[in-house]
């Protein structure tokens, strides 16, 4: 455990210089927690909190909380999920900060594949978005890959690379909403926990902005099955 905490401390200290630089530039920072916990052999509970800042820390852009119940169509794969999201946004409008609240229902399907060291994940998500004075629907597709570096498999104490691309499409005009491209390094703490630190570039119709991202993943099961 000492080696694990030493590596984690080194990662945090290394990110400190990056975050200091982020405060001086047009670069946001997202701090994220993802939980995917088995509650039976087939069912899982998804729980997620994302704290998104305009800068390194302190200037809130968005707080996102998601939860849902998923079902594995095959053993530990081909998961369908029904979920709910609460989103508090605080954008700047003409120099002043505004506050918007969104309630979101979403349905998703995740399937996984493995080719050698490449661990692929496809995620298809449909969202019904209830904004304060509007209703919108959106489709999202994400292709993600995790590649172990220091071992051949995603085993405990493994350093790995993570990349993904995700596109967002509106059901109304304009169709294109945004595209996210992400790259990171991660560390597998144990079979149920890992961390990642990376960079995501978000491309919108009239905006292109980068985000530093730090994520913690928890898959501790609530059942022995």
Image (cartoon, rainbow, N blue to C red):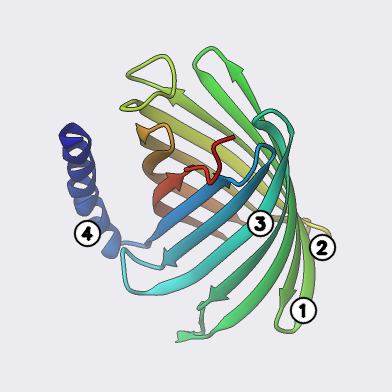
- Mark 2 → mark 4, Cα distance in angstroms: 39 Å
Position above or below: 102 against 143: below
Query: What residue sits 44% from the left and 45% below the top?
Result: 217
For the residues labelled 2 and 1, say whether their Cβ atoms are less than 8 Å apart: no
Q: Which mark is residue 20?
A: 4
Position above or below: 120 against 6: above
Q: Earlier in the sequence, mark 2 or mark 1?
A: 1
Query: What residue sits 47% from the left and 85% below the top?
Result: 97
Query: What residue sits 29% from the left and 58% below the top?
Result: 22
**Residue 7 located left or right of residue 106:** left
Image-quadrant location for residue 5: top left
Q: Earlier in the sequence, mark 2 or mark 4?
A: 4
Instruction: State the residue position of label 1.
Output: 134
Instruction: State the residue position of label 2.
Output: 173
Q: Earlier in the sequence, mark 3 or mark 1?
A: 3
Q: Decide which of 215, 212 is in the foreground and name it.
A: 215
């Amino acid at each position: 455990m000492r080696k694990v905490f030493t590596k984690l401390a080194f990662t945090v200290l290394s990110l400190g210089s990056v975050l200091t630089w982020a405060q001086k530039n047009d670069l946001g920072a997202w701090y994220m927690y993802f939980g995917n916990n088995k509650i039976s052999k087939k069912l899982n509970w998804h729980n997620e909190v994302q704290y998104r800042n305009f800068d390194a820390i302190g200037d809130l852009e968005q707080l996102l909380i998601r939860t849902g119940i998923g079902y594995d169509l095959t053993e530990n794969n081909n998961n369908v999920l029904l979920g709910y999201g609460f989103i508090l946004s605080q954008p700047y409008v003409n120099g002043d900060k505004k506050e918007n609240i969104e309630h979101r229902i979403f349905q998703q399907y995740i399937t996984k594949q493995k080719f050698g060291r490449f661990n692929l994940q496809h995620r298809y998500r449909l969202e019904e978005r209830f904004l304060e004075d509007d209703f919108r629907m959106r489709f999202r597709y994400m292709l993600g890959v995790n590649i172990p570096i220091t071992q051949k498999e995603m085993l405990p104490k493994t350093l790995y690379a993570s990349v993904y691309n995700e596109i967002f499409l509106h059901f109304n005009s304009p169709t294109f909403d945004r595209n996210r491209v992400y790259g990171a390094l991660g560390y597998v703490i144990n079979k149920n926990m890992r961390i990642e630190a990376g960079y995501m570039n978000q491309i919108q119709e009239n905006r292109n902005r980068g985000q530093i991202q730090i994520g913690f993943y928890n898959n501790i099961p609530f059942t022995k099955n």
